[in-house]
Amino acid sequence: MSRVKPKHQRLVLGVMALVALICAGLLAAYALRNNANYFYLPNQMASDPPPTDRDVRLGGMVEAGSLRTLNDGVTIAFNVTDQESGRIPVRFSGIVPDLFVEGSGVVAEGRLTGEGVFRATNLLAKHDENYVPRELEEMSKHQAEELVVEAREAQ
């Protein structure tokens, strides 16, 4: 009975490890392909709409004058726009973030319907660099500075 040389054993183990690694990578890529959320701007979504069965993200600004509450009292409707000519109507039912107002940035997660309306399942409101928490709005500038100094000293 012939024995396998140690050199060949290492080669076979190396090839098996490489095949296992490639299989694991392919399996992970296959599992994640349906979980990818693609990001669209309004003009991109208008020119090249995603499939209606794919969850995507729509980002832009809430168009001034477009925000309204529908008759059911729970659903809101608004338009998301960008600096170019893109404009997508959005419908959302649920709790609206505190920072969500007309003219603010928003990222809506959901699906585009066949009618061209984006049905959002989640809204993420964005704020600019001038954002001040609601708790600090009523403080004077001097009080806010004192609070910042106290927080630094506590660290």
Image: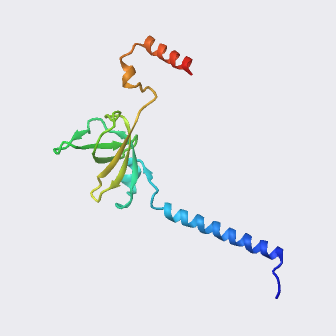
12 to the left or right of 99: right
**Residue extending furthest toward the front:** 1
Please indicate whether residue 68 sits to the left or right of residue 154 in the image.
left
Residue 147 percent location from the top left of the image: 47, 16
Depicted 78 relative to depicted 48: above or below: above
Residue 144 image-quadrant placement: top left
Q: How is the image coloured?
A: rainbow
Q: Quadrant of the N terminus?
A: bottom right
Residue at 48% x, 14% y is 145
Question: As drawn, which residue projects farthest toward the left?
Answer: 71
> Seen from this angle, which residue lies furthest bottom?
1
**What residue is shown at x 41% (from left), y 51% (from top)?**
44
Which residue is painted at 54% across and 19% down in the image? 154
Could you say where residue 33 lies in the image, as x and y percent from the top left? 48, 62
Given residues 94 and 76, the one toward you in this image is: 94
Q: Is residue 59 above or below residue 111?
A: above
Image side of residue 60 versus residue 73, left or right: right
